[in-house]
Image (cartoon, helix red, strand yellow):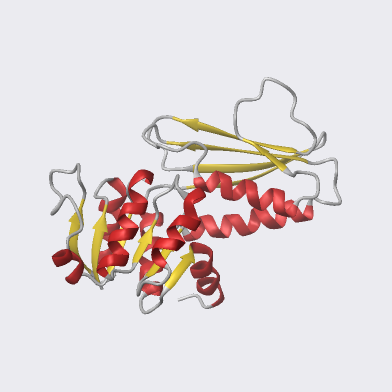
Amino acid sequence: MRVAIIGYGSMGREVEKVLKERGHSVSARVDPAQADADSRSLTEKLAGASDMAIEFSHADSVMDNARAYARLGLSAVSGTTGWHSRIEELKGIVLGSKIGYLYGSNFSIGAHLFFALVAAAADLANPCPEYDIMGWEIHHKRKKDSPSGTALTLARLITGRNERKKKVVTERLDRAPAADELHFASVRGGEVPGTHTVMLDSAFDTIELTHRARSRGGFALGAVRAAEWLVGKKGVFEVNEFIQELLRRPQ
């Protein structure tokens, strides 16, 4: 594939490394703020020289970028977070065009294995009311959104599978949480790529499930593999659709 990297920050540079390792080429590096990018915007010429775009940019750029992809006929994978409340708007832009568009809050394959473990744990805890469930995340000091998309995904998995936890609280609590509230806290600081923990706790023991990213490379690898999967497809896809097929037929 010839891939246009949209957003040439830390994640964009990781994506570039993985593309080269997997035998793909970078057709363009697009970023309005990075001095070493090839272009400030995606042009018709750059899109014509590309088979796919991989985007890790800013939430406020996602819709404009999607309009450009649809207009220029360029399929895209977006790992940008903080915009998923506007998914219907995104579908209105992409559906009816000739492109495929795949989005997600976390492209780490290991994280998706973690999601499956957390969902199973939330379900298994149903007949055990002595276990309370809570969670927290830690991310580097430059991360824009809080809670992260990954934290919200975990919270939705738990509240969707556990009979006792039905409401998600992500803000600071200056009171005792209600029995049906799942508290999921966020910390920002340092250089942590991303750590997420879900705890099941009773008066007798504690069970902790933790996913700890060592680098951004896992997210980049997942995004590139998702782009490989998206080739030839049209429509809007969520990262879980790619992951489910990947885990059924591992490569």
- In the figure, 183 relative to 233: above or below? above
164 over 23 or under it: above or below: above
Q: Residue at x 46, y 62 (%)?
A: 91
Residue 86 lies left or right of residue 177; in this view the side is left
How many numbered discs, if any?
0
Residue at image position (86%, 51%) is: 127
Task: Out of 79 and 114, give the one closest to the viewer.
Answer: 79
Whether residue 18 is visible to the viewer of this picture, yes or no, is no
**Residue 219 at x, y percent in the picture:** 40, 55
Q: Position of residue 83 (x, y in %)?
A: 45, 47
Query: With respect to residue 249, does 183 lie above or below?
Result: above
Is the N terminus in the top left, top right, bottom left or bottom right quadrant? bottom left
Q: Residue at x 18, y 71 (%)?
A: 48
Task: Look at the image and tell me in which quarter the C terminus lies.
Answer: bottom left
Q: Give left or right: position of 123 versus 89.
A: right
Give me the residue at 52% from left, 38% from top.
Answer: 147
122 sits left or right of 149 in the view: right
Quarter of the figure with residue 225:
bottom left
**203 shown above or below 104:** above
In the rendered image, residue 237, in percent from the top left (x then y), is placed at 47, 67
Position in image of residue 13 (x %, y %): 25, 52
Q: Is residue 52 visible?
A: yes
Q: Tell me which corner region of the image, top left, top right, bottom left or bottom right, holds residue 236.
A: bottom left
Out of 93 and 45, give the one closest to the viewer: 93
